[in-house]
Amino acid sequence: MKTNYDYERHKRLSESLGIEVEYKPRPTIGYVETWFPYIVYTTIILVLVFVFNIFMTIMRVDGPSMDPTLHSGQIALLAKSNNIERFDIVVLKEREVNGGETKNIIKRVIGKPGDTVTVKKGRLFINGEEYEEPYLNGDNIKRFKNESWEIKVPEEHYFVLGDNRDVSKDSRAVGSFTKSAVVGKKIM
């Protein structure tokens, strides 16, 4: 923004150089001109934060239940999505126990609504079909290899397990989770 001082300085410099330059000060609208870019940038940032909060969230992994896939302290970016597929990693609201507070937990979806999940000596079968689980680490499933059980997943529920099966507190201990308990699925 040019001031009268700038105009006088410009005029003297032009005269000393023998140049005739016509100076037309541009009209100013005061402080708005100075603050306008900041207002625009702030508005853009606020809109982006608002949109991010609607469609995504961030969570810090707490505990070893998803080792080796996710480690305690790692940050996970989640999409708030209702399109949950088998083997997606999801964050769920753990149910209240004895009136206590809920907390977010992160697990892998194994059974979808209506599925029959069977484990025979640590091998996973869903609806009678055996599934390989390449994300598991042999050191984290030593006790799990001795487990055998079967469960029918209720409608509108998911059956979830941690990748570190020997230490994970998951659907084997607390039961299946309703679709409404899903906070989001991991995308990064």
Image (tube, helix red, strand yellow):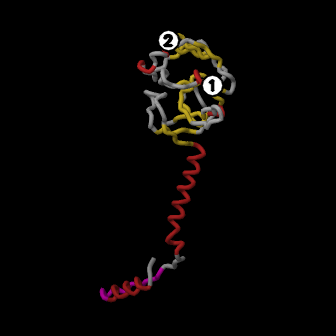
- When asked about the image quadrant of residue 158, the answer is top right
> In the rendered image, which residue does mark 2 sit on?
146
Q: Count the labels in the image.
A: 2
The spot of residue 2 in percent (x, y) is 44, 79
Give the residue type that dot 2 points to. Asn
**Extreme-right residue of the structure:** 155
In the drawing, does residue 52 fall left or right of residue 99? Answer: left
Residue 37 place in picture, x, y as percent = 50, 65
Q: Are marks 1 and 2 in contact (CB under 8 Å)?
A: no
Please determine whether, in this image, residue 52 is positioned above or below residue 167.
Answer: below
Q: CA distance from mark 1 to mark 2?
A: 22 Å
Say which residue appears at 54% left-offset and 27% top-offset: 108
The residue depicted at 31 percent of the width and 88 percent of the height is 18
Which mark is drawn over residue 176? 1
Position of the N terminus by quadrant: bottom left
Looking at the rendered structure, the kind of residue marked 1 is Ser
Q: Is residue 20 magenta?
A: yes
Residue situated furthest left in the rendering: 17
- Does residue 76 sit above or below 42 in this rendering? above
Q: Main secondary structure of the magenta part?
A: loop
In the image, taking residue 13 as reference, residue 188 lies left or right, namely: right
Along the viewing direction, whichever of 174 and 88 lies nearer the viewer: 174
Residue 138 sits in quarter? top left
Q: Earlier in the sequence, mark 1 or mark 2?
A: 2
From the viewer's side, name the closer residue of 89 and 38: 89
Magenta residues, start to end: 16-25
Secondary element at tag 2: helix
User: Does 138 lie within the magenta span?
Assistant: no
Instruction: Give how far across and how far down residue 176 sits, in percent.
Output: 63, 25
User: Residue 175: x, y in percent?
Assistant: 62, 24
